[in-house]
Amino acid sequence: MSKKELSERSAADRKQMAKRLEQLIVECGATFTREEGGDYPGPRAIHLRVAAARGLQITVELDGGSVQPDVHVMPWHMHYESEAKLDGKTFGEVNPYHHRKATHVAYGFEGLCENLKRGLQLAASGEAFLPT
């Protein structure tokens, strides 16, 4: 019997997904804050605001009310105080004008974990950034 993929549509799955993501974030040397429920991010949502090396940031959203469940848009961006710029050769699709934003898309929870881990590891090693 194959293992069921976790889905953000399920409240129990969202909690399990958030816990696994939090562990992954810490293992990759980044930090996070968690927002859950209420008016924002919403009664069926969990947001993890991640801060990585050199000011790289991302908010990971797990939203039970998503119109495209389990399709994860990953808006990477640099903190406004950071002078670091993302390297499109290593990091992927990066804004070609200012090199401070990149948007990736992951499909399913395992895809989200793989993409997040890759980005955080590239930041930790310094490979995500253009030479200064």
Image: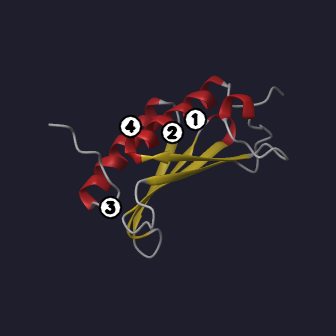
| Neighbour tally class for label 4: few under 14, some 14-19, many 20 plus, Cα within 10 Å | few
Q: CA distance from mark 3 to mark 1?
A: 25 Å
Q: Position of residue 31 (x, y in %)?
A: 51, 41
- Secondary structure beneath dot 2 equals helix
Rendering quarter of residue 89? top right
| Residue, disc 3 | 9
Q: Are marks 4 and 2 in contact (CB under 8 Å)?
A: no
| Residue, disc 4 | 23
Q: Are marks 4 and 3 in contact (CB under 8 Å)?
A: no
- Secondary structure beneath dot 1 equals helix
In the image, residue 48 sits, relative to residue 87, either above or below, namely below
Which residue is depicted at the point 45% across and 68% down? 67
Q: Position of residue 65 (x, y in %)?
A: 39, 69
| Neighbour tally class for label 2: few under 14, some 14-19, many 20 plus, Cα within 10 Å | many
Circle nearer the viewer, 3 or 2: 3
Which residue is depicted at the point 46% across and 54% down? 71
Q: Nearer the viewer, residue 123 or 107?
A: 107
Circle nearer the viewer, 4 or 2: 2
Q: Are marks 3 and 1 in contact (CB under 8 Å)?
A: no
Residue 127 in sight: yes
Circle nearer the viewer, 3 or 1: 3
Q: Are marks 1 and 2 in contact (CB under 8 Å)?
A: yes
Residue 119 numbered tag: 1
Q: Is residue 52 left or right of residue 88?
A: left
| Residue, disc 2 | 116
